Image (tube, rainbow, N blue to C red):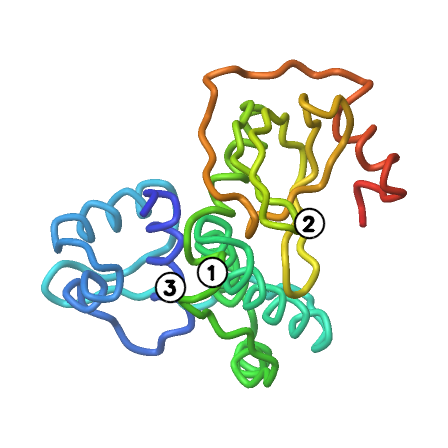
Amino acid sequence: MRRADRLFLLIHALRGRRSAITAQQLATTLQVSLRTVYRDVADLQLSGVPIEGEAGVGYMLRKGADIPPLMFTVEELEALVVGTRFVRAFGGERLGRGATAALLKIEAVLPDELRNRSRRTRIFAPQLSNRIEATGLIDALHAAIENAQVLRLDYRDGNGEVSVRDVEPLALAFWGGSWTMGAWCRLRGDFRSFRPDRIAAFALTGEVFAENPQRNLDAYLRSVGASANS
């Protein structure tokens, strides 16, 4: 866990309490050592966060030093919670971790009524081990897109025939039950959409492709009649 996230969660653990919480309880909650808790509390106090208490007694935020609530409507909050669940289920492991951390930070500054409402949302997106998102493939393709890395695919067509393609990956799209990856296909000299579930094997070629207005993301989106906000 990043130190900044740990400090945020430490403040969240102190927020709104009427009695002190011990360093041991904080250490258990944050899954860190007592020494780390003492150091983090001291650093927060030095930076001006009004934490009262001491080692062996416990800590709490000074009365009136609460964090102001975010102004979400019930519908906005439910959209955030449901969106987070869908990202965790379908966005791959890396984005799933990010979504979980983001929701935790949002809930940390909600008033009690809205925080309780967020936990009562009845729309779920179960995470299943047999989905393609659990294999790490979506994460790997996403990383290649972000780093502009040329991929070599062993790709099966609809008839099961395999061809080798060097592609410049540009975007991933989720269609509610399947994924496609938009890319510039060097074999065809044109844009193509590849289904990850038909990728028999892939490897990084070690080449990084340069931005080209004729075959970048904007050009791909125009070719399929979409936009960056779709």
Q: Looking at the image, which is closer to me, 55 or 225?
A: 225
Label 1 crowd bin: few (<14), some (14–19), many (20+), radius 10 Å:
some
Q: Amino acid at mark 3?
A: Arg
Residue 57: quarter of image: bottom left
x and y percentages locating residue 193 in the rendered image: 71, 41
Q: Amino acid at mark 2?
A: Ala
Front disc: 1 or 2: 2
x and y percentages locating residue 198 in the rendered image: 56, 48
Residue 106: quarter of image: bottom right
Per the model, the C-alpha gap separating discs 1 and 2 is 21 Å
Sooner in the amino-acid sequence: mark 1 or mark 2: 1
SS at mark 1 in the image: helix
Residue behind mark 2: 173
Residue drawn at (68%, 49%) of the image: 173
Residue behind mark 1: 100
Q: Looking at the image, which is closer to me, 68 or 114?
A: 114
Q: Looking at the image, which is closer to me, 207 or 166?
A: 166
Q: Amino acid at mark 1?
A: Thr
Per the model, the C-alpha gap separating discs 3 and 1 is 29 Å
Please state if 129 lies on the left or on the right of 199 as rendered.
left
Please state if 108 lies on the left or on the right of 84 as rendered.
left
Residue 71: quarter of image: bottom right
Residue behind mark 3: 62
x and y percentages locating residue 224 in the rendered image: 85, 41
Residue drawn at (70%, 16%) of the image: 211
x and y percentages locating residue 160 in the rendered image: 58, 49
SS at mark 2 in the image: strand
Sooner in the amino-acid sequence: mark 3 or mark 1: 3
Residue drawn at (51%, 51%) of the image: 95
Q: Looking at the image, which is closer to me, 223 or 80?
A: 223
Please state if 132 lies on the left or on the right of 34 as rendered.
right
SS at mark 3 in the image: loop
